[in-house]
Amino acid sequence: MKENDARVDYDPHQLLLYVEKEDGTYGPLQTGAYAAKNYLGDFIEKRGRIVQDGIEKLKNGQTSPVAHYLQFYSMTTADLAARAAVPLAKVKKHLTPAGFAGASLDTLRRYAEVFDLPLANLFALIVPKKDGITITARKTTNPLFTIIEIS
Amino acid sequence: MTTINYAHSMYAHCESGTVTGLLRHHGMQISEPLVFGIAAGVCAVFIKTAKVPFPVFEMRTKPGDIRKGIAKRLGVIFETARFKDPRKSFEKLDAIIDKGIPVALQVDMFYMEYIPDYMKTHFNAHYIIAVGREADGFIVSDCYYPTLSRLSTAALERGRFARGDFAPSGFMYHAVSVPPIDDARLKAAIIQGIRQAAFTMTRLPIPFIGITAIRKFAREIPTWLQRTRSSDELSHWIMMIHLLLEERGTGGGGFRFMYATFLQEASRIFGSAELLTLSKRMMDNGDKWREISMTVARSGKNRDLGPEKLGAIRDLVLARADEEEQLFTMLYKLFR
């Protein structure tokens, strides 16, 4: 690829490509990412729609928080089972609200670790009503205790 | 608190970049493409298992092979370690950093606090270099980012001890001996690297590796629609793969551009016109891979993912398989 064709002005997402320089030699070029610059907005919008759909299903009791975050992070049940060290059959059971209700605290803590969430986030979604408010659920050393910070 | 005077630099790929960074820190003036080529990093692998939600097409060898290839061909000695106990792994890590030696770590990318939210995905074979430690964390060099980053000890522990495929198990390594390379050794290493890559691509009798893997991947493309519930979901998958993998230099044309650069460097070292011609063809081949990548991304954005479009993308990928078969066969014959 020619150096001029590769050059993209996009600071938030930089990468390094090997390109053909003007003198015909090949070498590194640090540049912005073409796809991130042109398609990231669409990607985030689509992901937002999928997530919103998941939240509606959660609210209506059609799905469990485990199923929701599984979709949110684009994971499979087999991958979650391996990462959380929970049998696959159990993971599949916990995808339904009824199955989730029977999950042990230790199993839920394992899921929360994989999703990198405080455990409390498997039971609640805290949404600010006003712009400019930031809500952060912060994990503590105690895996069963979460601090919600509002700023 | 310890901070190593490590010259952070961006590289195209995390594993070849990490190995290059360590070698350069120890005084070996070598480029990332040379590291990649000598270690025969170029490849094509098609993965379709229950653990991946969408079939994955990789254009590199498996994680760890680049370090092993460099150790074998350039005589570099890396000390490696895996751990069951996180506490012991951090004691060892602290001790090496305190000696002023940068340490490469295998991590699950998901837990790296400095990556943007949209990039958060579980991938256990990401490599970073620890170049310092502070009271509550580490300073790390991740070659995908323009500057050094900070990482809390808790996040690094989660990343180093994530479970699943390619589980890092606290894997870490550092260079203990980096010998000077003379011309003869460098030439021998390049030949071995090219020979191995060409063999893997054209002659390895494993259906999901090499040229056969590219063809297998191509034939799967028309089935993508059946794998998802809607074109919106398919479009989401395509974009995710594109943003997370291809734009990080690990796919699209990225690896082929790097291999073309390696071949051009090799042509200078050997004074070979044939290698120079092949490097140009490899660069063109990389351009074509990138065009495919961009076509897919555009189609994803426009929800233009009907059978006709997917069939056209399949044909473009099959054309790349034909071209790569020719290229790697010529490389194989050149150094047979």
Image (cartoon, rainbow, N blue to C red):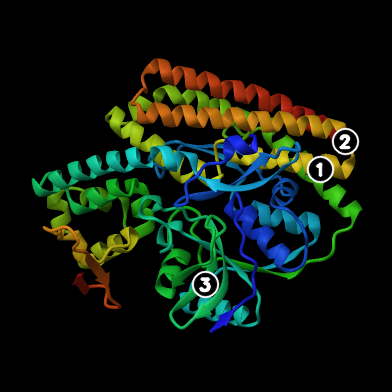
Image quadrant where residue A24 sits: top right
Which comes sooner in the sequence, label 3 or label 2? Answer: 3
Kindly indicate whether the residue at mark 2 contacts the one at mark 1 (C-beta within 8 angstroms).
yes
**Amino acid residing under circle 2:** Ser
Residue A27, position in %: x, y? 70, 45
Residue behind mark 1:
B266
Q: Where is residue B29 in the image (x, y as percent from the top left)?
A: 78, 60
Give the Cα distance between marks 3 and 2: 43 Å
Query: Left or right: B301 with respect to B142?
Result: left
Chain that bears disc 2? B
Name which quarter of the figure residue B209 lies in. top right
Q: Element type at marker 1?
A: helix
Check disc 1 and give the amino acid type: Ala
Q: Distance between the residues labelled 1 and 3?
A: 35 Å
- Residue B301 vertical position relative to residue B242 in the rendered view, above or below: above
Task: State the residue at coordinates (49%, 39%).
Answer: A34
